[in-house]
Amino acid sequence: MAKESKTTTDLRIGIADTGVDLMYEINDSIEKVIAKVQEALDAGKTLSLTDTKGRAILVPHAKIAYVEAGNAADRKVGFTTL
């Protein structure tokens, strides 16, 4: 049986007029995440996403200062010898 690969994206959203960054891992490609952000900004609507844990993320378009999206790094666990 083939293992299904999942594409995840690390997402950081800066909130305007605050020093707060929201950081999430999203189960979509970078292209899909950026398209959703651009759609919300262009339409003047609330950005709506779901993270890898199933939590809803809602950010008013007027409060988005910046968006940084990148590939989620593989989580490596283990030991090494020097």
Image: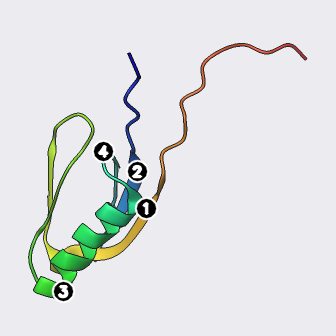
Residue shown at 11%/84% (left/top)? 44
Q: Is tag 2's residue or tag 3's residue first in the polypeptide sequence?
A: 2
Q: Distance between the residues labelled 2 and 3?
A: 22 Å
Q: Name the residue under label 2.
A: 9
Q: Is tag 1's residue or tag 2's residue first in the polypeptide sequence?
A: 2
Q: Name the residue under label 3.
A: 42
| Residue 52 % position (x, y) | 27, 38
Image height of 41 relative to 60, above or below? below
Q: Mark 4 points at which residue?
A: 27
Tally of numbered tags? 4
Three-letter amino acid code at the position of disc 2? Thr
Residue shown at 19%/77% (left/top)? 39
Q: Is tag 1's residue or tag 4's residue first in the polypeptide sequence?
A: 4
Image height of 80 relative to 23, above or below? above
Number of other residues with Cα within 10 Å of mark 3, as a class: few under 14, some 14 to 19, many 20 or more: few
In the picture provided, is 8 more to the left or to the right than 18?
Answer: right
In the picture provided, is 78 more to the left or to the right than 23?
Answer: right
| Residue 22 % position (x, y) | 32, 55
Secondary structure found at label 2: strand
Secondary structure found at label 3: helix
Of residue 46 and residue 36, the one placed in the foreground of this image is 36
Q: How far apart are marks 1 and 4 (CA)?
A: 12 Å
How has the structure been colored for display? rainbow
Rendered-image quadrant of the C terminus = top right
In terms of image quadrants, where is residue 69?
A: bottom left
Three-letter amino acid code at the position of disc 3? Asp
Q: Name the residue under label 1.
A: 69
